[in-house]
């Protein structure tokens, strides 16, 4: 059912059931309370993996060969 599971509330920094805080303030659902408690650690691990994946490392903006954007015209 849609209201099964546990959530990690980003405001209260706590695990909570479906009936607690609104969805925009939490991560989940997770199947167990323990999984929800690990939400921030799991999110950090995924972010680190993404940041270090060579397939998705874009060049820095100040690289000469990066090119330009239409928005460059509006820079002061």
Image: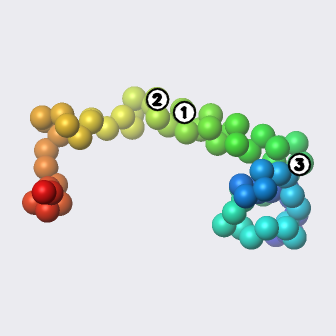
Badge 1: how crowded within 10 Å, few (<14), some, or many (20+)?
few
First reached walking from the N terminus: tag 3 or tag 2: 3
Identify whether 68 is placed above or below 21: above
Side of 17 where 13 appears, left or right? left
Q: Which mark is residue 32?
A: 3
Side of 29 where 44 appears, left or right? left
Element type where label 1 sits in the image: helix
Q: Quadrant of the N terminus?
A: bottom right
Pinpoint residue 56: horizontal percent, then vertical percent.
Answer: 39, 37
Q: Closer to us: mark 1 or mark 3? A: 1
Identify whether 11 is placed above or below 54: below
Say which of 18 and 55 sits in front: 18
Pinpoint residue 34: horizontal percent, then vertical percent.
Answer: 88, 42
> Badges 3 and 2: C-beta atoms under 8 Å apart?
no
Q: Which mark is residue 52?
A: 2
Image color mode: rainbow
> Badges 1 and 2: C-beta atoms under 8 Å apart?
yes
Say which of 36 and 75 sits in front: 75
Say which of 62 and 6 sits in front: 62
Q: Residue at x 19, y 37 (%)?
A: 62
Q: Residue at x 14, y 62 (%)?
A: 74
Pinpoint residue 71: horizontal percent, then vertical percent.
Answer: 17, 60
Element type where label 3 sits in the image: loop
Q: Residue at x 36, y 34 (%)?
A: 57
Spatial separation of the CA atoms under disc 1 and disc 2: 6 Å
| Residue of label 1 | 48
Side of 74 where 16 appears, left or right? right
Pinpoint residue 4: horizontal percent, then vertical percent.
Answer: 88, 63
Say which of 74 and 50 sits in front: 74
């Amino acid at each position: 059912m849609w209201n099964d599971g546990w959530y990690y509330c980003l405001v209260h920094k706590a695990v909570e059931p479906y009936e607690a805080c609104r969805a925009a303030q939490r991560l989940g659902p997770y199947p167990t309370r323990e999984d929800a408690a690990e939400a921030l650690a799991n999110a950090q691990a995924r972010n680190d993996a993404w940041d270090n994946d060579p397939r998705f490392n874009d060049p820095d903006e100040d690289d000469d060969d990066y090119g330009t954007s239409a928005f460059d015209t509006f820079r002061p």
